[in-house]
Image: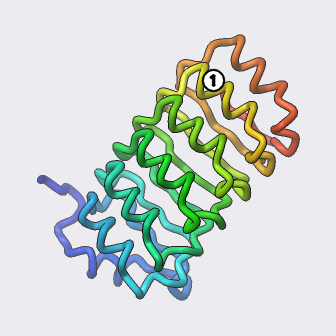
Amino acid sequence: MNRPFNDQPIETLIDQNLANEGTVLDLRLKYIGDDGMEFLSNCAKLVSLRELKLERNDITDKGVQMLAGSTILTGIKSLNLERNSIGDEGVRSIALSPSFSRLTSLNLWKNEIGSDGAKAIADSLILGNLQRLDLAKNKIGDDGGKVLAESQTLTSLKYVDLFGNGISQETQEIIKESLNFKNLQHLVLE
């Protein structure tokens, strides 16, 4: 596979991009794929990680499932998986993993998430601390928008971006009027 910005092994990338005393790892545009995710998930050096940036890395559901199953990466508060190939199964693994119970920010912008993925997030007892959720440019549609608005567990959300999900005006009004989003300060729908 052609990796236009990266021809280094994952071990080197971690050494070069791990910052703030091991709490932040920025691997945006490194194209680590699912193999890289497997390495990250088992890397003891990342035990103190709090922020993980994985934008544009050719990550699929398989890679996210490995991350969700990690016994090392259990303190992440901010997870950026923007512009990958993650679908409903990958999102479901995040929503069900105790490793993500500390998440306050989840960025899934421009993946392949449908209404089932939105439902997994909405029903998650694990993601109750989320304050920021970005699902823009996915495929959650009206069904996904409604389940998020009806969620009893996402009441800590302050920022939600659902732009580009094929959500009708009617469902947008339901989302805007949701009593479950009582702490919401910023909502992007179009």
Instruction: Say whether residue 143 is left or right of residue 91.
Output: right
Q: Nearer the viewer, residue 72 or 107?
A: 72
Could you tell me which residue is drawn at 71 percent across and 20 percent down? 172
Residue 188 image point, x, y percent: 68, 32
Q: Quadrant of residue 166?
A: top right
Residue 47 image point, x, y percent: 49, 84
Crowding around mark 1 (Cα neighbors within 10 Å: few <14, some 14 to 19, many 20+) is: few
Instruction: Say whether residue 49 is left or right of residue 190.
Output: left
Label 1 residue SS? loop
Whether residue 1 is situated above or below residue 177 in the rendered picture: below
Whether residue 123 is situated above or below residue 146 in the rendered picture: below
Could you tell me which residue is drawn at 82 percent across and 42 percent down? 185
Task: Report the residue marked by disc 1.
Answer: 190
Could you tell me which residue is drawn at 87 percent across and 40 percent down? 182
Residue type pointed to by label 1: Glu
Instruction: Say whether residue 5 is left or right of residue 182.
Output: left
Instruction: Say whether residue 55 is left or right of residue 37.
Output: right
Mark count: 1
Residue 165 image point, x, y percent: 53, 25
Residue 71 image point, x, y percent: 47, 77
Colour setup of the view: rainbow
Could you tell me which residue is drawn at 63 percent across and 23 percent down? 190
Q: Nearer the viewer, residue 34 or 96?
A: 96
